């Protein structure tokens, strides 16, 4: 009967050769008595299913414990996300981009500043929500009707 390292090595080799799993090194594999545990992060539900299928179809694997997390973000650097968000804000005529500050930390984008109307806050949010690589958005824009531009 193969040792757990033989089963693990077989699964690892199959993950690395499968084009559906672009980052196989992010999947941790352990085995005990024919039960394989998969842990780590994949980029899609499709990749998760493929990894589990590969493990299940490996010889002498009796069961698979799927503890994989799905993180669909592209994992872009924060400064690139910020730049893309600023470009999106500046290209939207409904957004007073000079009043909107953008910060990004670990893929999480935050809008701050003061705008005159709610529709400007909504437009700013809509402008940045399609930016590639963000994990989420916090809209901290304050709507102040009096006091801005008169």
Image: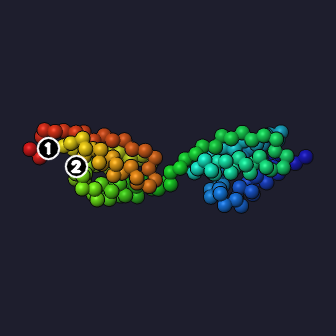
Position of 134 with respect to 11 (left or right) is left
For the C terminus, the quadrant is top left
Residue 100 is tagged as: none
Dot 2 and dot 1 residues touching (CB under 8 Å): yes
Give the spatial CA distance, label 2 vs label 1: 10 Å
Position of 134 with respect to 123 (left or right) is right
Q: Is residue 5 above or below residue 33?
A: below
- Mark 2 highlights which residue? 99
Q: Residue at x 19, y 43 (%)?
A: 116
Badge 1, how many Cα within 10 Å: few under 14, some, many 20+? few
Is there any visible trace of residue 112 in the rendered image? no
Q: Pick out the residue farthest to the left.
A: 150
Badge 2, how many Cα within 10 Å: few under 14, some, many 20+? few
Residue 148 is tagged as: 1
Where is residue 61? Give x, y as percent: 81, 44
Where is residue 135? Give x, y as percent: 46, 46
Where is residue 72? Give x, y as percent: 53, 49
The quarter holding residue 17 reads bottom right
Please state which of residues 131 and 37 is positioned toward the viewer in this rendering: 131
Is there any visible trace of residue 60 in the rendered image? yes
SS assignment at label 1: loop
Q: Residue at x 28, y 56 (%)?
A: 92
- First in residue order: circle 2 vs circle 1: 2
Where is residue 137? Give x, y as percent: 39, 44
Position of 3 with respect to 128 (left or right) is right
Q: Residue at x 26, y 49 (%)?
A: 100
SS assignment at label 2: helix
Q: Residue at x 62, y 58 (%)?
A: 22
């Amino acid at each position: 009967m193969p040792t757990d390292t033989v089963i693990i090595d077989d699964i690892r080799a199959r993950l690395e050769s499968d084009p559906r799993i672009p980052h196989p090194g992010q999947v941790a594999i352990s085995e005990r008595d024919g039960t394989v545990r998969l842990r780590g992060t994949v980029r899609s539900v499709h990749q998760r299913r493929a990894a589990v299928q590969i493990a299940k179809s490996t010889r002498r694997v009796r069961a698979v414990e799927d503890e994989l997390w799905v993180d669909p973000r592209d994992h872009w650097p924060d400064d690139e996300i910020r730049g893309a968000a600023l470009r999106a804000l500046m290209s939207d005529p409904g957004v007073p981009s000079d009043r909107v500050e953008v910060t990004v930390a670990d893929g999480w984008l935050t809008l701050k500043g003061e705008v005159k109307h709610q529709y400007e806050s909504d437009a700013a949010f809509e402008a940045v929500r399609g930016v590639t690589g963000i994990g989420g958005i916090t809209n901290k824009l304050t709507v102040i009707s009096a006091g801005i531009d008169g």
